[in-house]
Amino acid sequence: MEKSALVNAAGADFILMGTNKTMLKSKKPVIAVCAVRTGCGKSQVSRKLFEILREKGHRVACIRHPMPYDKDLTIQIIQRFAEYNDLDKYNCTIVGGTIFSGVDYVKILREAEKEADIIIWDGGNNDFPFIRPDLWITITDPHRAGHELSYYPGELNARTADIIIINKVNTAKKEDIETVRNNIKKINSDAQVIEGISTIIAENKEIINGKKVLVIEDGPTVTHGGMRYGAGKIAAEMWGAKEIIDPRRFAVGSIVDSFNKYTHLSNVLPALGYGNKQIEELEQTINSSDCDIVVSGTPIDITRVLKTDKPIVRVRYGVGEETSKELEKIVDSFIRKNLS
């Protein structure tokens, strides 16, 4: 909101539209999954909700916050992702059931309603939903305790949520978890608060032990999300990496610019892939790095979009068993209220 201060100090006016002006009304029940910052763990919660609902026999569509990086928005009016080829069809970036996205959300919503009994809104970064939810879930991150009160519009998500998940409690400090819990009580005492466990799974994790490792993390999480690390670094340390290298001296092109902009980063490489040129620069940075193996904490398999001769350990993260049980209770209650 620094820009707000600059605009108002100059004597000018501007408008921030709220939820009543911006949310579309769906004909189908909607669950919104949002967050107070990017990288809190929305996608793993959305995936689990999708899975639970499908197992209970419901048709589910997920509507994703738009990420229209292609210059030609006319091909992105409605995007429907049901298989890998659709990622190429719509020229997606590497930050990547059936998912709808695009730029015309009235059309997108109407198409999703044709296929689904229930719609999940999967928020982008820390924005609030474009579709009015019947159940609003907001994810917080104790690794960035206090951010639930200090970022817009993430604070709106915390203030408006029906359910707030304090995620990653299995890797966060107890005092940071309590800070988030106390802050939630101050701004949304009516919200149901549950603790979320984020499990980390690594393929071929045994090869990490004793190795010199390059860690690649989800780009948005460690750039504008402000995190110094992600699941990749946690996995590298958990499974005994001898050394986690500093990739900055191997960076080229726009990857250098990113490190100059996000000065809090040192021992992780952000997976930036906004266009073919940047993917090539990321690939060159990886291939030039002095390491034995690569540990990749990106949401997608990076080998689908770039080539390297270095062994890659892919790290995935999901919802822990106890959190899954909590989400199933939430789903059962939601179904009783909205589909009975």
Image (cartoon, rainbow, N blue to C red):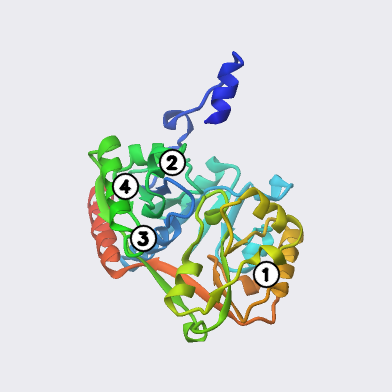
User: Is residue 132 visible to us here?
Assistant: no
Secondary structure type for disc 1: loop
Q: Are marks 4 and 1 in contact (CB under 8 Å)?
A: no
The residue that label 1 is drawn on is 305
Secondary structure under the numbered disc 2 in the rendered image? helix
Calculate the distance from the C-alpha at mark 3 to the C-alpha at mark 2: 18 Å
Eye-nearest disc, 1 or 3: 3
- Name the mark nearer the viewer: 4 or 1: 4
Distance from disc 1 to disc 3, alpha carbons, whole Å, reads 29 Å
Q: Which quadrant holds residue 197?
A: bottom left
Q: Residues within 10 Å of mark 4 (few under 14, many from 20)?
A: many
Instruction: Locate residue 198, reporting x and y percent.
Output: 37, 65
What residue type is disc 4 on?
Val
- In the rendered image, which residue does mark 4 sit on? 180
Crowdedness near tag 3: few (<14), some (14–19) or many (≥20) residues, C-alpha within 10 Å: many
- Tell me how far mark 2 sits from mark 1, CA to CA: 31 Å
Point out residue 190 in the picture as x, y percentages from the top left corner. 23, 39
Q: Report the residue at 57% width, 64% height from top.
A: 267
- Amino acid under disc 3: Lys
Q: Earlier in the sequence, mark 4 or mark 1?
A: 4
Give the residue type at disc 2.
Gly
For disc 3, the marked residue is 168
Q: Residue at x 50, y 69 (%)?
A: 232
Mark 2 against mark 4, which lies toward the viewer?
Answer: 4
Q: Are marks 1 and 3 in contact (CB under 8 Å)?
A: no
Residue 314's label in the rendered image is: none
Number of disc labels: 4
Marks 3 and 4, the one that precedes in the sequence = 3
